[in-house]
Image (cartoon, rainbow, N blue to C red):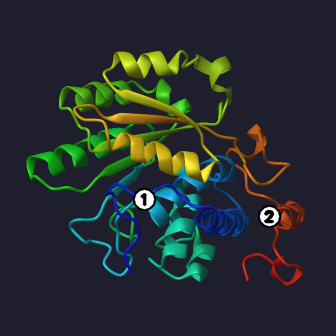
Amino acid sequence: MVFGGTEQMPPLDDSKVEELEEIARRVRVHVVKSTHEAGSGHPGGSLSATDILTALYFEIMDHRPEEPEWPKRDRLALSKGHAAPALYGVLAEAGYFPVEELMTLRQLGSRLQGHPHVRTTPGVDASTGSLGQGLSIAAGMALSAKLDRESYQVFAICGDGEMQSGQIWEAAMFSSHNKLDNLTVFLDRNMLQIDGSTEEVSSIEPIISKWNSFGWHVLEIEGHDMSQIYDAVEKSKEVHGQPTIIIAHTIKGKGVPFMEGSLAFHGKAANDEELEKALEALGEKDEDLEGGE
């Protein structure tokens, strides 16, 4: 099975949007179930990035789950590596490994560790976790494609708290200097990091002006709207000589009302009672409320 493709495509129709939204709903279920089973993890930032990851893997990126190392595949670096539960949920739904394996998250010996590991997990293109490094990895991949005259595209997803890392801006300079127009970055702008709001901890605004000044093409979208995510990537393909960053405004904990906009679930899993409430909010049937079974 081959997903997506980076050639110019027509706009998403309503049925495709509904299909992607249903996949994203299931991924959110996987996020809350797997982190609950592990007793740890980062559900908030995983849920805010779920729609972006779903659109990428099920509509935009060219990849083959049955051939994870396919040389011509599009690549993704999840620079905010703590959102691994969402990435794993998307990869499982796409067929890289069984959905049941998601319940081994963070267990000793599992292929699904707390941060993505390129050597152990099918479908993972970059080992990430130390914030700031993922964009550098993505830039290296994009430059490699240019040097080898390959047509694959490279995507990265960064957190907004991650914008406080100096390595991000080194990679930003490197990418624009090398005219990496095959690199598209999503900034998951959920406004919260582990210690508080990004603007209280260390303001990153004016974020659009900053990326413009570093030589990037900048787009701004609502990051839970599948059509806007898709259209922004289509617009990025029209840009030549510049990398693109898509500022995606999102909600931490999206889809689970008591997690939405809450710092408490940045790095804390739901307890048994909270899991049941979360699954009910996500539209799971009564027989599916066991979690981890």
Left or right: 87 with respect to 38?
A: left
Q: Residue at x 81, y 80 (%)?
A: 288
Image x and y of residue 152, in percent: 24, 56
The residue indicated by pointer 2 is 282
Residue 134 bears which disc, if any? none
Quadrant position of residue 133: top left
Q: The disc labelled 2 sits on which kind of residue?
A: Leu
Query: Residue furthest toward the left?
Result: 148
- Residue 222, located in which quarter of the rendered image? top right
Q: Which quadrant, please, contains the C terminus? A: bottom right
Q: Judging from the image, what secondary structure is the residue with disc 2 in?
A: loop
Q: Nearer the viewer, residue 109 or 134?
A: 134
Q: Is residue 30 visible?
A: yes
Estimate the spatial distance between the alpha carbons at disc 1 and disc 2, rounded to whole Å. Answer: 25 Å
User: Residue, x 67% and y 68% (percent of image)?
Assistant: 22
Amino acid residing under circle 1: Ile
Q: Quadrant of residue 201?
A: top right
Q: Which residue is mark 1?
A: 60
- Residue 114 shows in this picture: no
